[in-house]
Amino acid sequence: MRWINRRPGRPLAVALALAPFALAALAYVAGSEARLAANPADKLLPAPSTLWDAAMAALTEADRRSGEILFWNDTFASLTRLALGVGIAAALALTLGLAAGLLPLAGAGLSPFVAAVSMAPPLALLPILFIVFGLGEVSKVALIVIGTAPFMIRDMAGRVAETPVEQIVKAETLGASSLVIALRVALPQAMPRLIQAVRLSLGPAWLFLIAAEAIAATEGLGYRIFLVRRYLAMDVILVYVAWITILAALLDLALRRLSARAFPWAEPAR
């Protein structure tokens, strides 16, 4: 049997999935032990026990000034900004993507503008957003929207434009208006693609969120990371980075499960 036709069973698939994480953990432990053996005061690669203590302290210990657990406050603030930014971007992608992909006149007007905006580096616009919207929540959410919406709009417009012409002609023959065709023919086929576009946009969205929080914020995961870096608190930084990675993976898994449950017909054949 050729290797291209070999499929792992459930136990082997789990083992193969865990192997890279185990190798990365072993590499970290080996590097940490080597650096600490040479310099016990080294802070670059804290020992696993130090990371565990830092994680427990972050998750359970309240701040002396506010009496609140800052870790969970930072998590809530960042997830709120992320949800608002990605949600607004997804809504724009759905409406403008449908219009650009289904209506030739709208596509002729929107597509060049969206393409031009997508070429502008979002982080370069951050100072402008701070000047226009101030240092509050609006500028941070706007950065996520500007950084992710153009890609999703173009992706949605392309998917809607791929709607089979036969379906549109049949709907028109039955007397469907343009709005009905958009809602009953194009929209159901575009929704799985929208979820996929949101999944692909989560990585850039986290990047823009962390950058905005690092520059101007009083709470948030990115703010906390850049706050403690001045003290070389690598144990806290690594805990926050690991938590961001876990949150991103959970969000991606949730969207994937949502797509599989809501649109099983769009899932690839196995």
Image (spheres, rainbow, N blue to C red):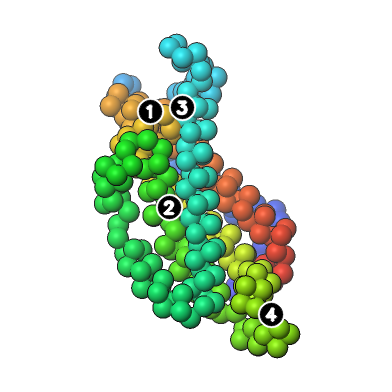
Mark toward the start of the polypeptide (1 vs 2)? 2
Q: Residue at x 54, y 41 (%)?
A: 247
Viewer-nearest residue: 242 or 8: 242
Report the Cα–Cα distance between label 1 and label 3: 24 Å
Q: Looking at the rendering, in which quadrant would you find the C terminus?
A: bottom right
Q: Residues within 10 Å of mark 2 (few under 14, many from 20)?
A: many
Q: Position of residue 31 (x, y in %)?
A: 38, 36
Point out residue 165 in the picture as x, y percentages from the top left corner: 61, 86
Query: Which of the pair 65/170 is nearer the observer?
Result: 170
Q: Along the polypeptide, which appears first: circle 2 or circle 3?
A: 3
Q: Quadrant of residue 189?
A: bottom right
Q: Earlier in the sequence, mark 1 or mark 3?
A: 3
Q: Which quarter of the image is occupied by the N terminus?
A: bottom right
Callout 2: helix, strand or loop? helix
Q: Position of residue 256 (x, y in %)?
A: 63, 56
Q: Secondary structure at mark 1?
A: loop
SS for dot 4:
loop
Q: Is residue 14 above or below residue 99?
A: above
- First-in-chain label (2 vs 4): 2
Looking at the image, tell me whether mark 3 or mark 4 is earlier in sequence order.
Answer: 3
For image coordinates 33% across by 36% down, the residue present is 135
Residue wearing tag 1: 218
Image point (57%, 47%), residue name: 251
Q: Which mark is residue 51?
A: 3
Circle 1 packing at 10 Å, graded few (<14), some (14-19), many (20+), is: some
Give, as a three-letter code, the residue at label 2: Val
The span from disc 1 to disc 2 (Cα, nearest Å) is 21 Å
